Amino acid sequence: MPNRITTFAEYLDEYRKSIDTPEQFWADKAEAFVWHQHWDKVLEWNFAEPSVQWFINGKLNITENCLDRHLLSKSTQPAILWEPNNPDEAVRTLTYAELHEKVCQFANALKNNGAKKGDRICIYMPMVPELAIAVLACARIGAIHSVVFGGFSFKSLSDRIQDAECSIVLTADGAFRGAKDIPLKSVVDEALETCPSVKKVIVLSRTNVKITMVEGRDIWWHDAILNVSAECPATIMDSEDMLFILYTSGSTGKPKGVVHTIGGYMVYVDYSFRNVFQYNDGEVYWCTADIGWITGHSYLIYGPLLAGATTVMFEGIPTYPDAGRFWNIIDKQQVNIFYTAPTAIRSLEAFGLEFVKPYSLNSLRVLGSVGEPINKEAWEWYHVNIGKENCPIVDTWWQTETGGILISPLAGITKTKPSYATLPLPGIRPVIVNEAGKILEGNNVEGRLCIEFPFPSIIRTTYGDHERCRSNYFDIYPNLYFTGDGCKRDEDGYYRITGRVDDVIKVSGHLLGTAEIESAINEHPDIVESAVVGYPHDIKGWGIYAFVVCNTHRPDTNALKQEIIDTVAKYIGHIAKPDKIQIVSGLPKTRSGKIMRRILRKIAENDMANLGDTSTLLDPAVVEEIKAGAIH
């Protein structure tokens, strides 16, 4: 198999080559793909702009590399194995030939409904095969997909549609998630009241709930593909054309649309998938992530399909109908590589081993962890009870903005260490800097994690606002990409991610901006002001602690707290609901009016001894009041 490292000595050799001759290194990897026109130049870059271009003037279509090139050798091999939310419902298998046919057919349906190259298409769908088909159909015709997680509210959906000026929305009547039915179409209808750019909505029938169809705008998926040809030549794209926009929370209220382009993203996700997981031809691979997040883009759809893998797609949740669902699917589908989040691992650990013991899990060869650093206890539980101490665990560090895994063990090759992401992949040059931006050389250092050289899948811009991309990622430390994460490098040169250093909380592996949550809380008519911080949470990694000031004399009631939770769910989605809400008379502020979140973080973490000097605050007494009422 091309582009696969097989020993640690080979890793060291590949890494050295990638640093000494990066352009030659990545050009060699790119040669494995189908290009309609070879690139003129491998790389041009300038982090000050920022401007990064890979495989300049190369022409290709990523779906030809995901699908068409596999048809001769893998036409009857399963591409997608779909496991429904309800275990009594039939599993669906799409071979590479069937997936190719359905992607081409839906690509033609999109064109029939006005979609063309460069259009932005919003996808707000359940975790069903049609979601993967929709993503690939957009890429087939050169439309830019913007997938929005099905748990986001109408306001979050509307903001994302407006920002990208989407012309088409792809959705479903509803979604099944555990015991719940999610009303997707009604959320879309509410969102579209403020989205004049949308001309068409294509609706998949999934839950068979009664919905409103707007004449002239809405069309059923099954009608859209009726009698439509399954032959659709791929639109030839430039390497630096946009492939997708994916919105992520920032430290200001407005989500930012991270842009990834085709050529570099393709080369990097394929390379990282093959090497991190050490994928062998014919193996069954399962990433449990929702396609609404970057993990689902890179390591459920694009990475596995580029490598010709069989990828499992799961509609449900780990605990439905019971906490053995993951392990049941692993045995049933004979999964060889399993990639999930520490939040899920900790949650299933809490249910006990009675849900694990009925399953052999003998097919497993590699385990993976994604979304946040995995704590030592969860790592050990995963290693012993799921991997039977036979499966290497790849603890992967990366971001929406990086497109692919940057720091991780290579399965069975890199010696692992619990809670450490270990070493960078070839082509990745991490540096640790102090707050002033000075690079800290050598081992046993701790600071902020930056990257000092572009890799093929690095963020290109934030959609419609390049200045925001520059100021968020490239301006804080000149000539470096700033990840926003704290990091330590130990005596072995291994990297351990220590958490966010900006106003972003990582809840269950998903970034949520504190400003966005505060803005939602402040929509409640009785709330004057709020401040949100993260605190360590046994299951989710980090929880959300909200300090809230009311404008009335409403007592500290459960009713008010529930109203605040409902308000956040309405404006952002249930994923952003505060875990703890403390009603306070005021917030700790400097004399210039800045909220001292550092103090609130210490209170939320129950670290009262390290609040620092509070005497210079506008009203030091408010800190004592907050400490006295803290929820622990």
Image (tube, rainbow, N blue to C red):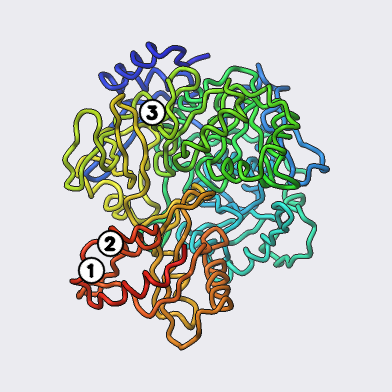
Whether residue 631 can be seen here: yes
**Are dots 2 and 1 in contact, CB under 8 Å?**
yes
Residue placed most toward the observer, 341 or 607: 607
Quote the CA–CA distance across marks 2 and 3. Answer: 33 Å
Q: Is residue 338 above or below residue 363?
A: below
Comparing marks 2 and 3, which lies closer to the viewer?
2
Q: What element carries label 2?
A: loop
- Percent across and percent down for residue 456 are 37, 32
Q: Which mark is residue 611?
A: 2
What amino acid is labelled 1 in the image?
Thr
- Percent across and percent down for residue 462 are 37, 51
What amino acid is labelled 2 in the image?
Leu
Q: Residue at x 64, y 67 (%)?
A: 189
Horizontal relation, residue 253 to residue 308: left or right: left
Q: Name the residue under label 1.
A: 614
Q: Which residue is drawn at 72% across and 32% down?
A: 357
Whether residue 173 can be seen here: no
Q: How crowded is mark 2: few (under 14 residues within 10 Å), some or many (20 or more)?
A: some
Answer with the quarter of the image where residue 288 lies: top right
- Percent across and percent down for residue 213 are 73, 65
Quote the CA–CA distance across marks 1 and 3. Answer: 39 Å
**Are dots 2 and 3 in contact, CB under 8 Å?**
no
Q: Is mark 3 on a helix, strand or loop?
A: loop
Q: Mark 3 points at which residue?
A: 422
Quote the CA–CA distance across marks 2 and 1. Answer: 7 Å
- Percent across and percent down for residue 492 are 31, 24
Q: Which mark is residue 602?
A: none
Q: Which residue is drawn at 53% across and 38% down?
A: 378
Of marks 1 and 3, which one's residue comes earlier in the chain? Answer: 3
Q: Which residue is drawn at 51% across and 46% down?
A: 144
